[in-house]
Image (cartoon, rainbow, N blue to C red):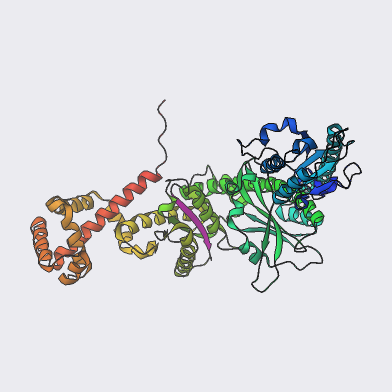
Amino acid sequence: MTTIDGSTDGHVPVGALLAEPLLRGTLLAGRAGLGRGVGWCLPLSETRRFADAASTEPDLGGIAVHLPVTTLAAPDEAAALVTGLARRDAAALLAWHPPGVESDLSRELTMAARAADAAAIPLLVLPAEADYRAVSRLIGQKALALSAHVLEYGSRVHRTLAEVLARGPGVPAMARAVVGLSRCSVLICDADGERLAWEEAPDAEPPDPDALLHALPEDLARPEDHPEFEDGNTHAAEVRLRIRPDGPPVHALVTPVLVGGQVFGRMVMVERDCPPDPHDLAQHRVVAEHGATLVGSEMLRQRSVRAAEERARGDFVEALVHGRFADSYELGARARHHGFDVDGHFAVHVVAAASLLPVGRDYLRKTVTATRTAQDLEPGGCVLTAAISSTIVVIQQVAAGPDPIRQRAEAARFAERLHLALRPLLGDDLRIAHGRPGQGAAGVAAGYHEARLTMGLAWHTAADPVCGYDDLRIFAALKDVAGSTEAKSFARETLTPLRRANGGDLERIVLAYIRTSGNLNAAARELGMHRNTMLYKLDRASRALRMDIRSADAQFTFWLAHHIDTLTTVTGVLADEMAPPAAAPR
């Protein structure tokens, strides 16, 4: 992390130390490494093991190595020592002239200087008074003063942002506070890339926020791709973006919003200049890291509030579709809280897809996202959504009036829009079924039952992906008949002989034959059979049914039995699912 005076991780740059009287004019080589940060100083005797060639780990980061100049007496050894310490990531080499040493080491120092320039590590030649005690005290005092300064600035930033968090005005207010501290334009988005807040800096020309969001590297949102995030802290990454192909580059700080190691989103601070001033950039890093932490707290709070609201709405929707209210007073109180008009007209839609089944790790996220998408599909209208079992239930308010055809058309249009919005999230096997609109809570319960019945029938009959109760009117007409004992006996006696013959293959063949209006060639093509094989199979079906399946009466008999059997199966499963749980035995 770069601090507010350009140092790294609270360390003092070597170039800043050279301004001190004790070290002034001592630089011999390695000018390219003056930006290295120094946190403390160690004598060579304490780091001797790092100078050996046996180890290659960079364990001297931020350390200035204080060594007697006599250790550079041999030219070859001097170069090897400098190279070895540079490989250990030492911040600087401080070659000290002990008192009384008057030997000429110019050749050795020349070799060491060449190695220092090649490794970009500063090499300083210190006078006798700059012994280890004096130099280590100087570096410690500078580092401590710097840390105190950084801590004071960070505390001021944190206090300012924490006051905004305590007032609870939301993520946009946090973004405005960050703009006030940094004078940078600020973009905050969630983990899915949805923009939560965008605040422009005063007197600046910020980029388009959507273009900025699109230009961000995706991997900056994944901590596992960045080793600096392994400690669980939030660090800002510098990126240079080109928003428009013909536009100037943009310098930005991208900070992941982490809560408990989980990525909740990203905060992007757009610098006013490219490249930015180092001092301003260091200050903005402090603001970014504190700001991202507190933005994460606010996002967690809002997520908790939203989850609680969704649970309450889900409980209300489940009570509506099952008619589970103690009395009209409970219904009225909960309806007022959720904006449900007890006298309004409503259509119930049921959403089903394989991705909503509780399989794998991703189904829960897809269920939540699809539920929220459906909830926000009709702004200003009363739409209540909830995940029930492995489906999503959507209650849509339709226009009140005496014309049921108009209400059903409105429900059908909403179902088409719902399918269009959810298909990218849930996949191509998405199905939406809806019942007929009804009035009040009773109408919702009846509509839910019809929607569930329609969904079950749609799976069995290969109906369209968006299907209403009216689209399966023949089943609706048979619903009361199918529930009778005589109808069930009729379907069973008609279909059982056919299902027992030839492994049950004949039923599928007869259905295809009836579906193609008795066209033998069309049915054979649909089933991928030869025409003669189709004829043989139909003859076997006729013998099993004890009637000629080519006759209209036989086809109607089979068709009616099949529809009654399908309706009986679906209503039986639905009755089991919607039955209240049995009381536990005492």
Q: Is residue 41 above or below residue 15?
A: above
397 magenta-colored: yes
Q: Is residue 121 visible?
A: no
Q: In the figure, is residue 53 to the left or right of 347?
A: right
Residue lying furthest bottom: 246
Please provide percent x and percent y for residue 65: 76, 37
**Magenta span dominant secondary structure:** strand
Residue lying furthest top: 586
Front residue (pair 133, 5):
133
Please provide percent x and percent y for residue 239: 67, 58
Quadrant of the image occupied by residue 218: bottom right
Q: In the figure, is residue 572 to the left or right of 358?
A: left
Quadrant of the image occupied by residue 129: top right
Please provide percent x and percent y for residue 492: 19, 50
Q: Residue at x 49, y 44 (%)?
A: 324
Quadrant of the image occupied by residue 329: top right
573 magenta-colored: no
Front residue (pair 509, 321):
509
Query: Is the C terminus in the top left, top right, bottom left or bottom right quadrant?
Result: top left
- Magenta highlight range: 389-398
Q: In the figure, is residue 208 to the left or right of 483?
A: right
Q: Residue at x 14, y 54 (%)?
A: 498
Q: Is residue 402 visible?
A: yes
